[in-house]
Image (spheres, rainbow, N blue to C red):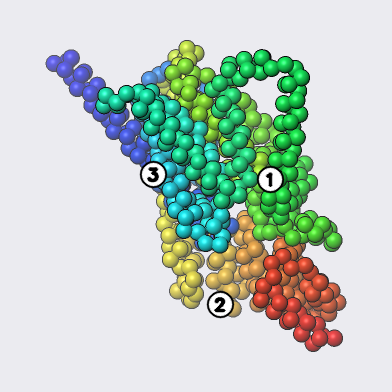
Amino acid sequence: MTGCTMINKLNLKSIVVKSISTIFCVGLLLLIIYLMFYNTFSFNYETFSNQQYLLVFFLPFLILALILALTAKQQYRRNLFPGLIFIALVLSAPIFTDYYSFSNEYFFNLTIIGLASYCIFLLNHNHFVDSIVACFLILFLIQLYLGLDQAFSGGDQQGLSIKGSMKNSGVYAFYLVSNLPVFYFKCLRFQNTKILGIKTYVTAICSWSIFISVFVAVCYVIVLTQSRTATVCLIGTSFYILGQKYANEIKTSFARISKTTFRALVMVNIFGLIGFCVWLFRLKKLSSFGRIMGFDITIQHIRENFWLGTGIGRFTWYYPQWQAGYFANHSKPDLIYFISASESYIIFNEYLQLFITVGFVGFTLCGYGLVCFFRLKTQKNSDLLIAIKGTVVAILISGFTSYPLHVNIMMMMVGTYIALAFSFDIKHTENKIQQPIYYKNAVILICIVFSCCAFRKGYFIYCASIKWSSLRNSFGAKNLVEYKRIHPLLKNDGKFLIEYGNQLISDSSNIFDAIATLEKAKKILITRQGIEALTNAYRTAKKYELAIINQRFLINYLPNRFQPKYDLLQLYALNRDTVHLFELGNNILSMPVKIPSHSVAKIKQNTIKMLKQHQ
């Protein structure tokens, strides 16, 4: 009886573990799909975009993963415990702090993706690998189909319309490229598979035909979108995969070449690379100068938070001020900079932005982690590990001229594949140690408690955000009552405060409450919409000097926009400041036009009328 009881207990435990594991896997797949189709970017400046709050529902799946970890074997590497402690610290942030909260869009997106990735590493189950890789590849093929459908049905702006479900053609193009290494690995594995008695050479032909077709389709999309980042990614990743896969053959081939021929090849490649870079730069010249401008402005502030950085999610608050400060201090900036300036919150260089965000210390730790990742080796999954590294290489290459670490599905791919790579290393290493069970269980239990507390708080905030969404685009006393009711839960959300401030402006008796609310929003989030609302509040309160200060910030932030300057011109007229009125009016009339339009012509006509009225 005792033996039967033990067997039943073991069977029951096995069933429970498998059930929890399956539920977590389903949650993980749902998270990946949500990030792909509904929550594309980790930072959105539009006030109506608040998709990060729904991510709180991944926390119960995290709790299940941690419970599952309690039942796992006791052999763990030493680096597992710092990771668990880090999870506890990350989960405590939205519970106990105001800034690193659910409302910090970039931080919370990054937190959920990081926790999901670490759970994959923590659980270390074999069936996760195939399921997750298959999910990424299925989504890749779906996105490719969507892009080709858009390509064949596109109009005049065919290239810009090809973006799958990712809202941006450039992001879409380098997303496709980043999936090619793992897709190549799957095709390579399939060619050696014998299915239903079919001969191996038949499956090989099929697999290569599929890969070549997909590769050509991706190249076709790159050509249509004219994505320079995707082009560089494709070339760089191809060289990396070939170098890793056929390193010995390449070395043997170069060994047979004479020194003169080798030097000639090197010179040809150098000149070819220079010519290629010049062509890429000129392909979209204005966009290229915009990237240079963002890099130039940011690099001037690198010393301000050198060691620890601005903090996660804070760069998007600093950069508008830096751009406004640059044009405020340069009365006659370079024309190409002037034309290139746009409503930017991130720069197209992830490495500089990462350094500014986490400082020298954090950047060094990230670099060390990448070095450890690329040094990983495994025998059983060697081809998959090369493919995973190829995908990470593609994403890292795109980080030089774009923002892959602000695209949620790209961050999820990086986190997941790195977690899988480290789990391969753990499975086949002999360097395992026996840790006391109470150390592991104590830390995991703390993580579970923090997860429960975070989920409880996050759930109420999510409900408040749903109520907030239902109140949009309508005004009135009832709306104000509802806004006041949910304000305590969303008081750290700059987007909510901007919309709440606009609601208060509609009621003249609450104008000073509106100013206070919008000033608080300005300390959390700086956007064109927020500054315009604050300027409007001061204008309604007849505090023209303060309204002018905020509007000046806006025209320095967006120096080539006509509407903000015309709004400032009207404020000068209300404040009876004719000196600045004539100065700004002449500036509007002589300002170069980026994109000719009827609205610009009308603003210039109205400016002429206003100058005549105040002569």
The reply, left or right, for residue 574 in relation to residue 433 is: right
Q: Amino acid at mark 2?
A: Asp
- Check disc 1: other Cα within 10 Å, few if <14, some if 14-19, many if 20+: some
Depth check: give the residue in front, 508 or 186. 186
Q: Where is residue 59 drawn, in percent x and y?
A: 42, 42
Q: Nearer the viewer, mark 1 or mark 2?
A: 1
401 vs 81: above or below: below
Residue 290 position, x and y percent, is 71, 53
Residue 407 in the figure: left or right of residue 466: right
Position of residue 372 relative to residue 560, above or below, is above
Of badges 3 and 2, the one in the foreground is 3
From the image, tell me which residue sits under label 2: 507
Task: Check if mark 1's residue and mark 2's residue have beta carbons within 8 Å.
Answer: no
The residue drawn where x is 18% and y is 14% is: 3
Tell me the crowding category of disc 3: few under 14, some 14 to 19, or many 20 or more residues within 10 angstroms, Cα based: some
Along the line of sight, the residue nearer the viewer: 67 or 195 = 195
Mark 2: which secondary structure?
loop
Outermost residue to the left? 1
Say whether disc 1 or disc 2 marks the residue closer to the N-terminus. Answer: 1
Between marks 3 and 2, how big is the CA–CA gap? 43 Å
Q: Residues within 10 Å of mark 2 (few under 14, many from 20)?
A: some
Q: Which residue is mark 3?
A: 30
Image spot of residue 317 (x, y percent): 66, 53
The answer to whether 372 appears left or right of 25 in the picture is right
Q: How many marks?
A: 3
Of 358 and 88, which appears nearest the observer?
358
Q: Which residue is mark 1?
A: 280
Name the quarter where the N terminus is drawn: top left
Q: CA distance from mark 1 to mark 3?
A: 38 Å
